[in-house]
Structures are given as structure tokens and as C-alpha cells.
Amino acid sequence: MAILSIIETPDARLKQISTPVATVTDAHRTLIADMLETMYDAPGIGLAAIQVGVAERILVIDLQPDADDTPDDAASEDIVRIKQPRVFINPEIVWASDELSVYSEGCLSVPEMYADVSRPARIRVQWLDDQGASNEAEIDGLLATCLQHEMDHLNGVLFIDHLSRLKRGMLLKKLEKLRKTG
Ligand code: GNR
Ligand code: NI
């Protein structure tokens, strides 16, 4: 496994439209393992392949990124949080609710910047898993928000593209300043 470097805005690769995966191969499964390791290391709750420079329609999510992989005290009364890596290949939204949900989003490719984004609260999604098997589910909550954020990456869209030009400009200026001052 390997930790990959994450591309940041304004890198033009983030605007690329990623290509569907025709057949899920061992090379894809290696990439997915590396993407998960990279996401946990960042840390983040999601990562799209284009964020590590691969323009294929693959994304990973784990809403419990700081969970313990190996709970060593099963008798403990602590809530045992187990990592829950999720893999989506060629995801497609087949239905979206009219009801919207607002969440303060961030992005590993737009580091340390956050802004409210409004998206459908519930979506029905089809995708392939890492074995190439077809899946379909209705998703809501933070998973729906995160999945739509990741699917945007597959289409070259960042969360800041959902903001007004004024807001986006202010945020990018803030990011530039932060990079200069450290
Ligand atoms: O780590 C992340 N947090 C997050 C918070 C709200 C909405 C979306 C996200 S995804 C982001 C990681 C990332 O940049 N994925 O592309
Ligand atoms: Ni992102």
C-alpha cells in the first residue's frame, strides 16, 4: 500500500472528466487500497481517483475515518467504532429528492476552506463494487452529501463551483494568502 499525493486547486487535472471503468482489475483494487490509505492519512471522509491524478470513475468513502481497525478490548464499554470503507465505481444517480440538505463542506483539494453547499437530501445510486458487481441503494444523510461531492470530482467539479463567483473568489484568495503565510 502507498500514500499518494493529493492534487490541489488550481491544478487543471481537477477539471478533467473521468472515464468509466470498463472492467475492474487487480490494478484498480491496488489503486483503491492506496486511495483508502491516502484518505485515512489525510484525514478525509472521501476521495475521488482524480484527486490522486487518476482520471477514472472511482471513489472511496469512510464516514468514520478515525475509527479503530483493531478494537483490542472487546469487553470495554466504549463504543467500538470500526472502519467502514466504501468503494463506488462508475456511480450513477438514478433519482434525487426535491428536498435539499445544506452541509458545510470541505475538500482535500481545497485545503482548510469550508462553505455551505445545498444538494438533494436523498439519492438513489447505482454503482459497481471492487469485484465488479452491480449495486443499487437509496442513500441519505452525510453519506448522500459526501457521495455527491465525490461524484462531482468525477465530472471535474469542486464544491466551490456551487458557490457564487464572489464567495468562490473570496475563498480562493483566502487559500492563496494561507499558502503564502503558511
Ligand atoms: O474530508 C472531506 N470532508 C467532507 C466534508 C463535507 C462534505 C464533503 C467532504 S469530502 C472531503 C474529502 C474530499 O475532498 N473528497 O473529495
Ligand atoms: Ni473533495
Image: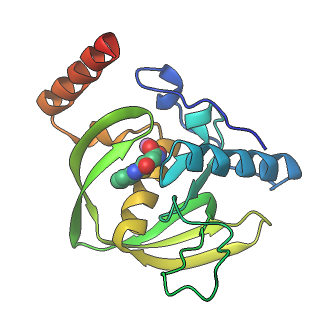
Q: Where does residue 171 sit, x and y in percent of width and height? A: 21, 28
Q: Residue furthest left?
A: 166
Q: Where does residue 144 sit, x and y in percent of width and height? A: 40, 67
Of the pair 109 and 78, the residue shown nearer to us: 78
The picture quadrant for ligand 2 comes to top left
Which scheme is used to colour this image of the protein? rainbow
Of the pair 3 and 54, the residue shown nearer to us: 3
Q: What residue lies at 12% left-to-right and 28% top-to-bottom?
A: 166
Up/down of 110 relative to 64, above or below? above
In the image, 17: left or right of 175? right
Q: Where does residue 64 sit, x and y in percent of width and height? A: 49, 65
Up/down of 94 relative to 21, above or below? below
Q: What residue lies at 64% left-to-right and 74% top-to-bottom?
A: 71
* Quarter assignment of residue 169: top left
Q: Quadrant of the N terminus?
A: top right
Q: What residue lies at 58% left-to-right and 37% top-to-bottom?
A: 50
Q: What residue lies at 60% left-to-right and 68% top-to-bottom?
A: 83
Q: Quadrant of the C terminus?
A: top left
In the image, 143: left or right of 127? left
Of the pair 112 and 97, the residue shown nearer to us: 112
For the question of whether residue 127 can be seen, the reply is yes
Up/down of 5 relative to 147, above or below? above
For the question of whether residue 152 can be seen, the reply is no
Query: How many labels were placed on the picture?
Result: 0
In the image, 154: left or right of 2? left
Q: Where does residue 112 sit, x and y in percent of width and height? A: 32, 35
